Amino acid sequence: MFAKRIIPCLDVDNGRVVKGVQFVDIRDAGDPVEVARRYNLEGADEITFLDITASSDDRATMVDVVEQVASEVFIPLTVGGGIRKIDDVRRMLSAGADKVAINTAAVFNPEFVREATEHFGSQCIVVAIDAKAVNDHWEIFTHGGRKPTGLNAVEWAQKMTEYGAGEILLTSMDRDGAKTGFDNRLTRAVAEAVSIPVIASGGVGELQHLVDGVKLGGADAVLAASIFHFAEYTIGEAKQFMSKQGIEMRL
Amino acid sequence: MKQQIAVVDYGMGNLRSVSKALEHVAPDSRVKVTDDPNDIANADHVVFPGQGAARDCMAAIKRHQLNAVVLEAAREKPFLGICMGLQVLLGFSDENNGVELLNLFPGKVTRLPPAMQGEEGLPLKIPHMGWSQARQTQSHPLWHHVDDDSRFYFVHSYYVEPDDEALAAATTEYGVNFVSAIAGSHVFACQFHPEKSADSGLQLLRNFVQWDGR
């Protein structure tokens, strides 16, 4: 049977994990390589790095991080944040990333997604969508949820699928950081509208939320950051919990 | 002399993870990512990865003039095909309105059927992206210490149908029950990515570098 995936996400600023990670047996909780190693041992199905470095000059640091992780962690690695040009994609893939997530650049230049998938294949292009509920639908916002775009999130996901995206990383900006669970209505609306896998993101505060993301939202994978960083739960515990609720997992 | 492992580079896809994983399991070997026919001819083991569309892969193999040397390697020494490196060993692919392949193993490559029913009332997604079980259908040195039904990481929309069903080394269920690995003469080739499949994948690669091809 096909397993649903758990994807821990690390926000990296200038080569350091931000928001902190609290593992007793980690020497340097800000070192993304050490944190990735730990998540791999716990059974993560993939790892996503989100580069939130403000200055593009510092992005070379992220390349080093990916290179180091890729030489010792043998599960799929995704890198997002600041991917704007074909060259950015190439740089991350040759550093050892398996997929890149394109976010804002897709909104301002959708052809970039088509170009990237034609160059590198759909399997390595993830389109990240940050959506907020507006009246009876969801709209895409950029700049950390501050700038509306007027784009309908569900329609956008369909368009990105047509442009060749291999996967959708769907974040509810309403739920992000709120710890009240995914916006499962949003996830379901997108999962039903597209033929490619959908990763639910934003809002996980407890293990039941992961189950709900799959069962109610219809997500193919669930992404979470803080519940794993602060060692509230290990990834192994999360997988056991989901498995006991009847969800197929890689244990 | 150090054991030489050639990772065939014909410009299709990212070979860094493959070479890193091989270096990890075979620290005493020399792993070389190469498109030089001499390197491939001189290597002790050959790894043949690949990503992307069938037509592009075949065009790239021809452009790099690797047809003959790849087929020769597959007949002579331990040879591991991964993902498209499995598919192009067959005869014909339905992808891109039909593509002639290397035809080491007669048979065809077919698209996963659309509208396969998954769980939660949603259709199964294509590509098949994620961790699925490989049911071992023959004993093989590459399965040494790999549990039957272990999960491996897959990313693909097409699957192989070898004419000779006895070539199957594993099958996997994703809407259809498809051949996810084949083994014949010196070749082991898998649809999944052992270099991205954590411990099970590393064990398979470890078995490969220790395999004499028999």
Image (cartoon, coloured by chain):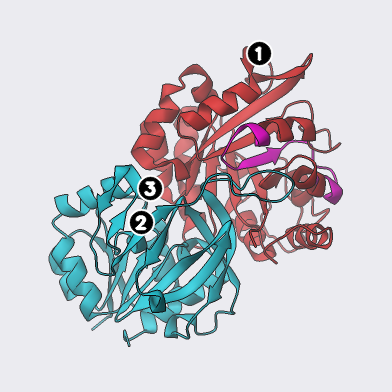
Chain colours: A red, B cyan
Residue extent of the magenta highlight? A191-209
- State the residue position of label 2: B15
Q: CA distance from mark 1 to mark 2?
A: 39 Å
Dots 1, 2 in contact, CB < 8 A: no
Q: CA distance from mark 1 to mark 3?
A: 34 Å
**Which residue does the image show at 76% across and 39% down from the upper left?**
A217
The chain letter under disc 3 is A
**Which residue does the image show at 40% across and 64% down from the upper left?**
B161
Mark 2 Cα shell of 10 Å, populated few (<14), some (14-19), many (≥20): many
- Residue type at mark 3 is Ser
Left or right, A73 with reference to A140: left
Left or right, A235 with reference to B102: right
A73 or A181: which is nearer to us?
Answer: A181
Q: Mark 3 against mark 2, which lies toward the viewer? A: 2
- State the residue position of label 1: A148
In this orientation, does residue A54 appear? no
